[in-house]
Amino acid sequence: TSALLQAGGNLVVGGGTGTVAGGNIYNGWQYDTAQLQAGGTVRAGNLSGYHVSLSSPDTQVGTISGNYITSNGGLLSTGALSGHNVDLLLSALVIGNYNNGGVYENTFSFNQGTLDTLSTSLSVLRNNNANAALSSSTLNIGGGVATLGPVNLTASAAAGNLNITGGNVTVQGITSPGAGTATLNLSDATLNVAIQGFGNPGSAPIQVDAFNPSGTVNLGFSGAGFTVGQFPLISYGTMGGSGFASLNLTSVPAGVTASLVNNSGNNSVDINIT
């Protein structure tokens, strides 16, 4: 039996025990103030809203769509869409968009189905006070297919962590303009970099403080206008895990012959086109 639940303003589901079950849940596409906050259990065929906020839900949804989705329901909050197939289509995935004076930890996890977002941002603090350096946000991807757009791991003093432990992930780049530590952990997964612009990039599209590859990590890049030469793909402050030995170049643009280079003197993993 299907059901339709609509709200033009804010729809709040429980504080940890509430349950909403239905075929479709729609919430306020018209206004910036419209939010859907899920603190309990959500069962739906489709979950749509301008702002879908997941605090600590047990969520089983066929499709989530909205202008942006956040996982920042409290100082310690977890949003998990895992253990079952989901289809996420978002304008932005924001984890840790927090305006609070305390120390916080926000985590969002995904491991089955499709995650497709135009941009991804972590640790976007609107109150970047002294406690920010003790706070962090984490995105866990353990499987499925994820297209994350440009990824901003931290825009504040808080740390940002991207853990990819399975699946096939595509990014336009990974940056960390904030003072917080940006960490990329890759293990037994595929990471593709959709390089923007035309030709060999002048700087690495992936820039992190800590890069930790382990197991078998397949790297690929795409774009247009590449020429013979060498350029950095991943720039890091430190490289741990199993290091360069874990990395394989498995996908390149048509007509391009390339290999990976361990450019340790430059703290980078480079692409060499011949």
Image (spheres, rainbow, N blue to C red):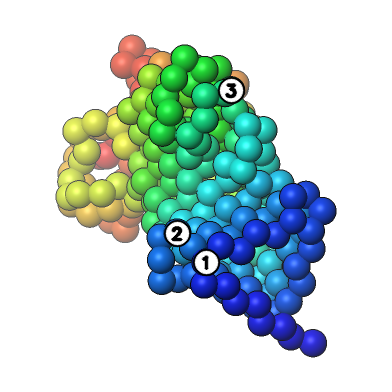
Query: What secondary structure is marked by label 2?
Result: loop
Query: What secondary structure is marked by label 3?
Result: loop
Q: What x and y, as percent, mark residue 247? A: 51, 33
Could you tell me if the residues under marks 1 and 2 are in contact, i.e. CB atoms within 8 Å?
Answer: yes
Residue ID at (49%, 21%) = 132
Seen in the picture, residue 164 relative to 176 is either above or below; the reply is below
Seen in the picture, residue 124 relative to 83 is either above or below; the reply is above
Label whose residue precedes the other's in the sequence (2 or 3)? 2
Q: Real-space Cα distance between discs 1 and 2?
A: 7 Å
Residue ID at (41%, 33%) = 126
Which image quarter holds the C terminus? top left
Q: What x and y, as percent, mark residue 4? A: 66, 82
Q: Mark 2 = which residue? A: 33
Q: Nearer the viewer, residue 100 or 104?
A: 100
Q: Which mark is residue 9?
A: 1
Query: What secondary structure is marked by label 1?
Result: loop
Residue type at mark 3 is Val
Q: Which mark is residue 103?
A: 3
Residue type at mark 2 is Thr
Q: What x and y, as percent, mark residue 269? A: 38, 27
